[in-house]
Amino acid sequence: MSSGNIRGSGIKRSREIFAKTRGYTSLIDFPRILGYNWNTGRKNTVSSYKRNWLTKRNIYRGPGELYLIRYVLLNYKFFAFYVHKFMVSDYDVPHDHPGNFLSLPLTAGYREHLPDGTSVWRGKFSLKFRTAEEFHWVELTKGPAWTIFIRFRRRRDWGFLTPEGWVHHDEYNHRLGIDE
């Protein structure tokens, strides 16, 4: 390994990695710091950045509009443990999830709206379990909110409940001009 490989090509390399990992960035990036992958003994490649633990992803709900910061502590097929920082409220269109989940607000809390028109205040440390098929949307009333989010096994696609019926999240985002 030559010394030139340790630094890569700077900003250009970082942009390539960011694009190929769909926005996930590592919180602790030891392979990048050390210049090669300890598991394979080879120079780093983009695939070595696709980790399922200790990563961060910024999720946008519109061009340049940061919606959520997701800190991935663990992400496996049957279980995921995230810390979310909601920056803005959901759109007022109910959505479901790919798997059952637990949510635990850590700070300000939020108002959770249900399709039947009711809403519930989810205050600090109010644990809530929901099935994948339950629709809801989140409204922030006291600024950004931090939550612990535990997702169980993915078992379905998720989407939005629109007046026309259920719409897959990719199609809905495409309609809004958001293509990840």
Image: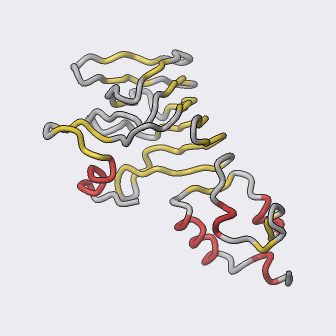
Is residue 164 or residue 61 the one in the foreground?
164
Q: Quadrant of residue 38?
A: bottom right
Q: Is residue 165 left or right of residue 110?
A: left
Is residue 175 or residue 107 the one in the foreground?
175
Q: Is residue 43 left or right of residue 97?
A: right
Q: Residue at x 59, y 37 (%)?
A: 80
Q: Residue at x 18, y 38 (%)?
A: 165
Colour logic: secondary structure
Is residue 143 or residue 164 the one in the foreground?
164
Q: Is residue 67 left or right of residue 2?
A: left
Question: Which x, y percent locates residue 18?
Answer: 57, 65
Is 80 above or below relative to 21? above
**Across the whole image, how many numbered discs are drawn on residues?**
0
Q: Quadrant of residue 49?
A: bottom right
Q: Residue at x 46, y 50 (%)?
A: 59
Q: Residue furthest left?
A: 164
Q: Quadrant of residue 106?
A: top right
Is residue 69 or residue 19 the one in the foreground?
19
Q: Residue at x 51, y 60 (%)?
A: 22
The quadrant the N terminus occupies is: bottom right
Is 157 above or below relative to 26? above
Is 129 above or below relative to 67? above
Question: Which x, y percent locates residue 151?
Answer: 53, 33
Is 9 above or below relative to 95? below
The quadrant the C terminus occupies is: bottom left
Question: Which x, y percent locates residue 175?
Answer: 23, 55
Question: Which x, y percent locates residue 172?
Answer: 27, 49
